[in-house]
Image (spheres, rainbow, N blue to C red):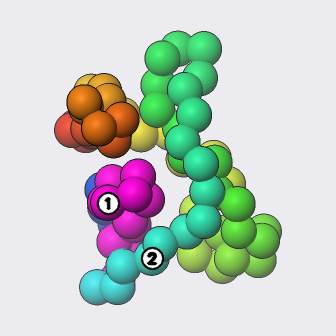
């Protein structure tokens, strides 16, 4: 199972999985290693049912633009 991630308008995480796009409720945060993390606020049945973790660590470069929106380029 290959997942793809992108940040869309309103700083929402979109996850591509099996030809579908999922939009889990959650919040972005930054961990102690300055890594961007998305904390999924869905039920455990939801994230486990999709084969994901409740805490998604995004690898890549990130920042915030003049409108306070995320800019993310993953590796």
Residue at left 52%, top 14%?
33
- Residue identifier under label 2: 22
Quarter of the rendering occupied by the C terminus:
top left
- Which numbered disc flags the more N-terminal residue, 1 or 2? 1
Question: Which residue is the site of mark 1?
Answer: 9
Q: Position of residue 42 (x, y in %)?
A: 71, 68
Residue projecting furthest to the top: 33
Say if residue 6 shows up in the picture: yes
Residue extending furthest toward the bottom: 19
Above or below: residue 13 compared with residue 57: below
Q: Is residue 39 left or right of residue 37?
A: right
The residue range painted magenta reads 7-18
The quarter of the displayed image where residue 20 is located: bottom left
- Give yes or no for residue 8 being in the magenta stretch: yes
Tell me the quarter of the picture where residue 13 sits: bottom left
What secondary structure is found at the residue carrying circle 2? strand
The residue under the point 33% across, 41% down is 69
Is residue 38 or residue 68 the one in the foreground? 68
Return the residue nearer the eye: 12 or 2.
12
Classify residue 59 as left or right of residue 66.
Answer: right
As drawn, which residue projects farthest toward the right?
44
* Label 2, residues with CA under 10 Å away: few <14, some 14-19, many ≥20: few
* Horizontal and vertical percent position of residue 56: 54, 47
Which residue corresponds to the image point at 59% horizontal and 48% vertical from the top-left? 27
């Amino acid at each position: 199972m290959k997942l793809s991630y992108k940040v869309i308008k309103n700083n929402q995480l979109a996850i591509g999985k099996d030809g579908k796009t999922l939009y889990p409720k959650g919040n972005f945060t930054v961990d102690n290693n300055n890594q961007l993390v998305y904390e999924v606020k869905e039920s455990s049945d939801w994230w486990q049912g999709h084969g994901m973790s409740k805490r998604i660590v995004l690898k890549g470069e990130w920042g915030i633009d003049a409108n306070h929106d995320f800019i993310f380029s993953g590796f």
